Image: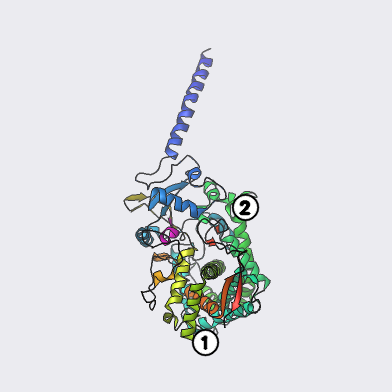
């Protein structure tokens, strides 16, 4: 009887202790750190998910603007157990992007696992440049910028290479005048072709090349992912689960694998050919110089060493395709749509280009500063569309203070660029498309504004900024000088470009919806 009494007492104690421990655990796991920025509540396990993603599919852009309006210029929430801090103030974004404590990237497990050499990196650190940090980021970024600058960035040879692709695009459009057509795919293929010419030294003669089109589609799909703000990824107990049959479609691993495979199908034969024909006395292009550096690296800890160096090469080329084409090609598709919406501005750009370069002359980078209306239209396209509605998130290496709040270690820092680009306290009538905001009173001088943060800011600004700006100008000016883009008809309206247009796909970037225009030859 005594034993039975002890058992009953033990069970009674368990009935008290288990609920008590669960209650304590739920209390502690739902607490926010002391002095954390304002934001929605945090629940055990799932964090703030029900409050920030109440519907599916997820729209990160609308979510960020709603939360910025409710909680202010800095706010924090939890994706599962991961802290996310969204900054919607220009001065604070500049401040936080300059800090040593935020000079890294948060983990993006599905994308990392799909990349060459990324399968062994369960810490979430990415190979390459864009998402890496520490010594690997320093040496890969420094080397790549130096070599690409030598093989094209800022040199007339780069301009010639881009103009080859511009000419092919102009010729393609000349064959489809005065009829409805979509511009998306042709523009994207042309920009990729130009980049490939710069990096490898070879060009695709045919814009209908099936491999090029396959890559364009893969890049487009990859940019629809929510990346480091994917709530499914945030809830996984272990990163390997992102590969599981059902979860891989929800985490973005399937899309990442598809994209990486398609790009490497094109890239690897060129790498193999360069390895076979490599001549240390004759550096032909970026690939040769990179291979030479791999061969001369003796430090086993270097990201250029041995097989790791070959993985790094593949990852750098992957990133050049994504970062090097998205800003230029997607922004160009948006810009054509905006010009079709605003024929008067389109005509002003055309008249200026003809005045400066002549009826038959080609727009050049040397005289880029002489076309202020064109430059203002370009910057207003960047501002209004806000292709990168958030800048690539940073990660916090340790606790730090910002605007009177304490940001905990391992937080994702998300700069809300769309809010900066549409802040009514700074921009007059921010929802309107108005290039004159970047011109002086008589439209004779272009007045830039650093609040248009297309390429990021701080220590990790986009390394491809120089190329992207030059590419975009040459493509945009070439198209505007040769053609006029018009709506198909009153019965076929052009899509809008505002935040509430449901046809705009929002993931890592704001993808322009498909549309048709009629292209007219300028007389």
Q: Could you say which is closer to the camera, residue 288 or residue 48? A: 48
The answer to which of marks 1 and 2 sits earlier in the sequence is 2
Q: Quadrant of the C terminus?
A: bottom right
Query: On residue 249, which mark appears?
Result: 2
Check residue 416 for magenta coloring: yes
SS under mark 2: helix
Q: Residue 32's x, y, as percent?
A: 40, 43
Q: Which residues are magenta?
A: 414-423
Res. 142 image quadrant: bottom left
Q: Is residue 382 magenta?
A: no
Residue 517 position by quadrant: bottom right
- In this view, the mark in front (1 or 2): 1
Residue picked out by circle 1:
361
Task: Identify the disc placed on residue 468.
Answer: none
Numbered circles on residues, count: 2
Q: Nearer the viewer, residue 521 or 239?
A: 521
Residue displayed at 34% across by 45% down: 35
Res 4 visible: yes
């Amino acid at each position: 009887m005594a034993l039975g009494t002890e058992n009953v007492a033990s069970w009674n104690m368990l009935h008290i202790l288990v609920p008590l421990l669960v209650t304590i655990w739920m209390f502690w796991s739902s607490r926010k750190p002391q002095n954390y920025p304002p934001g929605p509540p945090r629940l055990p396990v799932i964090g703030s998910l029900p409050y920030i993603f109440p519907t599916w599919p997820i729209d990160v852009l609308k979510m960020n603007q709603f939360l910025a309006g409710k909680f202010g210029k800095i706010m924090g929430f939890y994706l599962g157990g991961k802290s996310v801090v969204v900054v919607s103030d220009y001065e604070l974004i500049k401040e936080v992007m300059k800090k040593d404590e935020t000079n890294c990237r948060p983990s993006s497990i599905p994308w990392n696992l799909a990349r060459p050499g990324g399968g062994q990196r369960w810490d979430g650190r990415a190979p390459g440049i864009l998402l890496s940090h520490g010594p690997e980021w320093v040496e890969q970024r420094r080397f790549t910028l130096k070599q690409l600058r030598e093989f094209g960035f800022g040199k007339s040879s780069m301009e010639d290479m881009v103009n080859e692709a511009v000419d092919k695009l102009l010729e393609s459009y000349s064959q489809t005048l005065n009829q409805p057509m979509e511009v998306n795919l042709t523009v994207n293929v042309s920009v990729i072709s130009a980049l490939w010419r710069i990096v490898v030294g070879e060009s695709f003669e045919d814009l209908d090349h099936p491999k090029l089109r396959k890559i364009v589609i893969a890049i487009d799909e990859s940019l629809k992912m929510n990346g480091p703000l994917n709530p499914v990824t945030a809830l996984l107990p272990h990163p390997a689960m992102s590969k599981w049959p059902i979860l891989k479609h929800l985490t973005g691993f399937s899309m990442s694998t598809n994209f990486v495979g398609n790009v490497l199908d094109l890239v690897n034969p060129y790498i193999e050919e360069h390895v076979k024909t490599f001549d240390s006395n004759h550096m032909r292009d970026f690939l040769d110089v990179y291979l030479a550096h791999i061969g001369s690296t003796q430090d086993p800890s270097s990201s250029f060493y041995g097989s790791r160096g070959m993985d790094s090469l593949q990852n750098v080329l992957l990133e050049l395709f994504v970062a090097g084409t998205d800003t230029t090609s997607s922004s160009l598709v948006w810009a054509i749509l905006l010009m079709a919406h605003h024929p008067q501005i389109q005509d002003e750009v055309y008249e200026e280009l003809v005045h400066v370069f002549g009826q038959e002359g080609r727009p050049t980078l040397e005289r880029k500063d002489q076309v202020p209306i064109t430059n203002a239209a370009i910057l207003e396209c960047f501002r209004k569309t806000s292709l990168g509605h958030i800048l690539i998130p940073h990660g916090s290496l340790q606790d730090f203070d910002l605007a009177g709040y304490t940001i905990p270690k391992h937080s994702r820092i998300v700069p809300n660029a769309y809010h900066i680009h549409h802040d009514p306290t700074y921009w007059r009538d921010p929802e309107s498309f108005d290039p004159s905001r970047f011109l002086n009173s008589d439209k004779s001088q272009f007045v830039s504004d650093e609040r248009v943060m297309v390429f990021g800011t701080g220590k990790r600004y986009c390394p491809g900024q120089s190329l992207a700006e030059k590419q975009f100008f040459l493509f945009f000016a070439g198209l505007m000088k040769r053609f006029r883009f018009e709506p198909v008809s009153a019965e076929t309206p052009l899509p809008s470009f505002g935040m509430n247009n449901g046809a705009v796909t929002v993931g890592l970037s704001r993808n322009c919806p498909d549309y048709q225009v009629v292209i007219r030859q300028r007389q």
